[in-house]
Amino acid sequence: MKTIGSVLAIALSTTSLIGSTAAIGQTPTTTGQFSSVSGTVTYRERIALPPDALLIIQLQDVSKKDAPAVAIGQQIIPTQNRQVPFPFEIVYNRDTINPSNTYTVQAKIIIENQIRFINTTSYPVITRGNPNKVEIVVNSVGTSPQPKSVFSKFAPLNK
């Protein structure tokens, strides 16, 4: 339980640094200058998440090619024995959105302080005709087989 506490503490401190962030597990109502991006997060593997897994979904500005994405908002969802699909809603301030920029949603599932699932497909939202609702599929991290070396076909030289 200490593990989830430390991850949650880090995630919450990140949340406080981001201006328009949805509270954990809540579905806020959008009004006035605020809008939201919503949808679901799921994965295809037929495995259950442990009760202490965390789902972190971020709305990011990915407009600058050789720079890290800038988080606009996020939602942190403790899974608490629930399983996919997980609904989410990230509230953001419309004044922070530049119509010529590109925004995406990133989702990751953290288990025992390690990223175990993350989306490998880009999910553009908000601008350039993209929707405000997305269905995100995350993929397992580190389960794909490693390519074999071309040298593995050769027996070692005996001298």
Image (cartoon, rainbow, N blue to C red):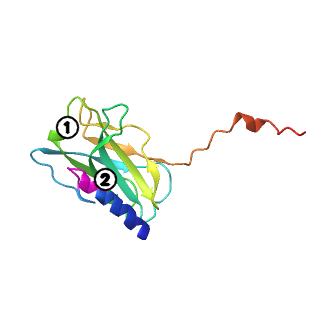
Question: Label 2, on which residue?
Answer: 87
Regarding residue 67, the answer to whether it shows in the image is yes
Q: How far across and down, in percent of the image, does residue 55 sit? A: 37, 55
Instruction: Pick whichever, 89 or 2, lies toward us.
Output: 2
Residue sitting at 20 percent across and 33 percent down? 98
Residue sitting at 39 percent across and 55 percent down? 84
Q: CA distance from mark 2 to mark 1?
A: 23 Å
Quadrant where the N terminus sits is bottom left
- Residue drawn at x 24%, y 56% is 16
With 32 as the anchor, is 51 left or right in this view?
Answer: right
Which comes before the other along the chain, label 2 or label 1? 2
Q: Which mark is residue 97?
A: 1
Relative to the observer, which residue lies in front, 82 or 158?
158
SS for tag 1? loop
Residue 78 can be seen in this image: no
Q: Quadrant of the C terminus?
A: top right
Looking at numbered disc 2 in the image, what kind of residue is underneath it? Pro
Give the magenta-colored segment's residue range: 14-22
- At label 2, counting other C-alpha atoms closer than 10 Å, the crowd grade (few under 14, some 14-19, many 20 or more) is some
